[in-house]
Amino acid sequence: MELKIQKVSVKALSEGDKTTFDAGTLKVNRQEIVDMLMKDQRFSSVRVELARPGDSTRIIPVKDVVEPRCKVEGPGEVFPGFIGDVETVGQGTTLVLGGAAVVTCGKIVGFQEGIIDMSGPGADYTPFSKTFNVVLVVEPVEGLEKHDYESACRLAGLKVAHFLASAAKGTSEGEVETYELPDLARAMTSFPGLPKVAYLYMLQSQGLLHDTYVYGVDAKRIIPTLIHPNEVMDGAIVSGNCVSACDKNSTYSHQNNPIIDHMYRKHGKDFNFVGCIITNENTTLADKKRSSSYAVKLAKMLGVEGVIISEEGFGNPDTDLIMNCRKAEQAGIKTVLVTDEYAGRDGASQSLADACPEADAVVTAANANETVVLPRMERVIGLPDTANVIAGGFEGSLREDGSIEVEIQAITGATSELGFSRIGAYTI
């Protein structure tokens, strides 16, 4: 399966009489977007705001972030099951507005959305301080259930991301990069001498607005299965989560999964990357056992010698992570885990809710309980008072002067367990 990504670089964002893209500038007609989204009768109002890197702007509470993409050649359409049909994606050519993002903002749950600061110390913790953001502030009609509000908000972000990318169709700008893996028959015999490695991709699926969608299907309704990494780039996996902002895998981070990108770049050099196994994170012991055993069974069927396993969330999903690790290691498959930590503000508490001796190769995305003071911003998009109830905040987090004291848990993407973050480390 071959996918070409035509990535054009957005270098400026402004208002325009019509939504267009030319010479690096994305111009947005707000009313076009409002008119499109207000066709959804679940909204009482829609407001469109623009936020640029370096602006003294705070966005709160953030639900999701989506990168504008659309198909320009080949079967299907991006975000299958939502924008496109449910036909398989991951082939042909996809146009990407690199450096742009659609940010959805709404008080759906309140305590499990996030903060994006476009400047100041908070901007150092989120990758979305560096993107040109089209922000959708969407309000529900009276009496709308939370899950319907989330569904409407999710669809709004995907629609606008597709709409913005479509405005750049026909451009000759940008560079094209090709992603391709052979079918399994050839993959099994490719690169003799190199270890075969797969990616075990854990998806948040605990329910009660802790959901991820695969081709439009809630991931808690699936058993572990194979997915081509190219499908992920075309939006086959979409976030529906209202979980802690720091390690929520936004749709944008799925589209730009750094683990998949890394494995492609090392493919044929350090190892033979044979594909992705997606699995869910469940709430019952029986479901955890079923999914972990089935995921490891698929890895054994592929004959891999190693897997990289990434988690989403913390606490209850830690048990899924460790169960996947232990069963893989006991099956003779070496594992590397990617997670984050909740070790308390002093860093002295147990980092994960579960552990096992086999988990001896772990990459951490940092301690989400670390605190930071976010200074007052000149402009706030959304509802600043949610800082007092947001995960990582507390009563009094929002100070009278407009500054906010929170754990970095409240900052969107701060400790991404896909590695899509701005926190790093080096050896001394």
Image (cartoon, rainbow, N blue to C red):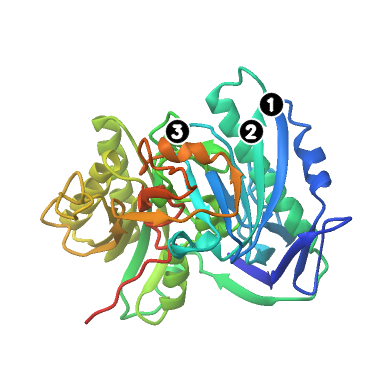
The residue type indicated by label 2 comes to Ala
Disc sitting over residue 42 in the figure = 1
Front: mark 3 or 2: 2
Q: Are the residues at dot 3 and dot 2 in contact (C-beta closer than 8 Å)?
A: no
The residue type indicated by label 3 comes to Arg
Q: Quadrant of residue 223?
A: top left
> Is residue 6 rendered to the left or right of residue 276?
right
Residue at label 2?
A: 152
- Estimate the x, y position of residue 182 in percent, counting from the top left: 51, 69
- Estimate the x, y position of residue 108 in percent, counting from the top left: 53, 32
Who's the residue at 22% across and 53% down the image? 325
Q: Are the residues at dot 3 and dot 1 in contact (C-beta closer than 8 Å)?
A: no
Q: Quadrant of the C terminus?
A: bottom left
Who's the residue at 64% across and 69% down the image? 5
Front: mark 3 or 1: 1
* Circle 1 SS class: loop
Who's the residue at 15% across and 49% down the image? 350
Mark before the other along the chain sequence, 1 or 2: 1
Mark before the other along the chain sequence, 3 or 2: 2
Q: Are the residues at dot 1 and dot 2 in contact (C-beta closer than 8 Å)?
A: yes
Mark-to-mark CA distance, 1 and 2: 7 Å
Mark-to-mark CA distance, 3 and 1: 25 Å
Is residue 388 something one can see in this rendering?
yes
- Estimate the x, y position of residue 269 in percent, counting from the top left: 39, 82
Residue at label 3?
A: 221
In the depicted view, which residue is nearer to us: 167 or 95?
Answer: 167
In this view, which residue lies farthest toward the left?
A: 357
The residue type indicated by label 1 comes to Arg
Q: Quadrant of residue 259?
A: bottom left
In the depicted view, which residue is nearer to us: 274 or 11?
Answer: 11
> Is residue 89 rendered to the left or right of residue 44?
left
* Circle 2 SS class: helix
